[in-house]
Amino acid sequence: MTVSKDEANDLFHALIRLQKLLLAAKSSAPRVNAALDAGAYPTLFTIARLGPVGISDIASLVHSDVSTVSRQVSSLVAHGFLAKQSDPSDGRASLVSLTDAGHDVLGHVQHVRGTWFQGLLDDWESDEAHEFTTHLQRLSEALDRNLRDRGDAPPAAYTASPAAAGRGTATPARPVTKEN
């Protein structure tokens, strides 16, 4: 059976609440390492997963702009967590990879984060956490595919409102209400 619009909106609202709670936790959490900005975690984790990788590839994978990732990489290199090397297929470009210090700080971040999340899940069974992770990864993959498929275009469910015609502003096809 397919998911109804009400069920989809309930899930979306739950995810919005989760996103806000994660942002609040991020802003109030102690820094794991004074030299490591939590905003660079996706960049660091992507490099750890892929090995030597180019900055534009990282930006694409984390859905960020190249200038942001470039700044993060420069900071991570300056603090000794990453190393740059010439890209053998394009001498003008660089590849970045984790240093030993990068592996160490990543292990520490994962330990601290894992301990915190384990505490949040103290009343969950292992199979519940596994099933939730599987569904969350499935949703993440669907969203990633959707973002890549549509590029910068708004979702198909969006149309230009008459008031916005000619200004390129997209508005929802229906007004957002509690019932949607």
Image (cartoon, grey):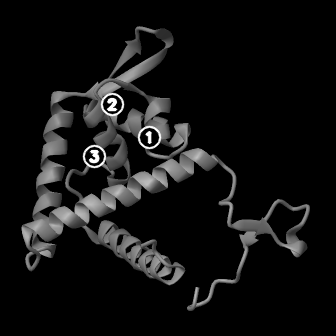
- Say what amino acid the circle numbered 3 marks: Ala
- Give whichever of discs 2 and 1 has the lower sequence position: 1
Residue 80 drawn at (x, y percent): 25, 31
Locate residue 134 relative to residue 150 in the image: left or right. left
Residue nearest the viewer, comparing 4 with 95: 4
Hey, which quadrant is residue 77 in on the image?
top left
- In front: label 3 or label 1: 1
Locate residue 179 relative to residue 91 in the image: left or right. right
Q: Are marks 3 and 1 in contact (CB under 8 Å)?
A: no
The crowding category of the residue bearing disc 1, from other C-alpha atoms within 10 Å (few below 14, some 14 to 19, many at least 20), is: few
Who's the residue at 33% across and 39% down the image?
Answer: 46
- Give whichever of discs 3 and 1 has the lower sequence position: 3
In the rendered structure, find residue 77 and report the number of the disc placed on it: 2
Q: Does the rendering let one see residue 173?
A: yes
Q: Residue furthest front?
A: 1
- Say what amino acid the circle numbered 2 marks: Val
Marks 3 and 1, how far apart in space? Answer: 24 Å
Who's the residue at 17% across and 35% down the image?
Answer: 103
In the rendered structure, find residue 35 and report the number of the disc placed on it: 3
Locate residue 133 relative to residue 164 in the image: left or right. left
The local secondary structure at tag 3 comes to loop
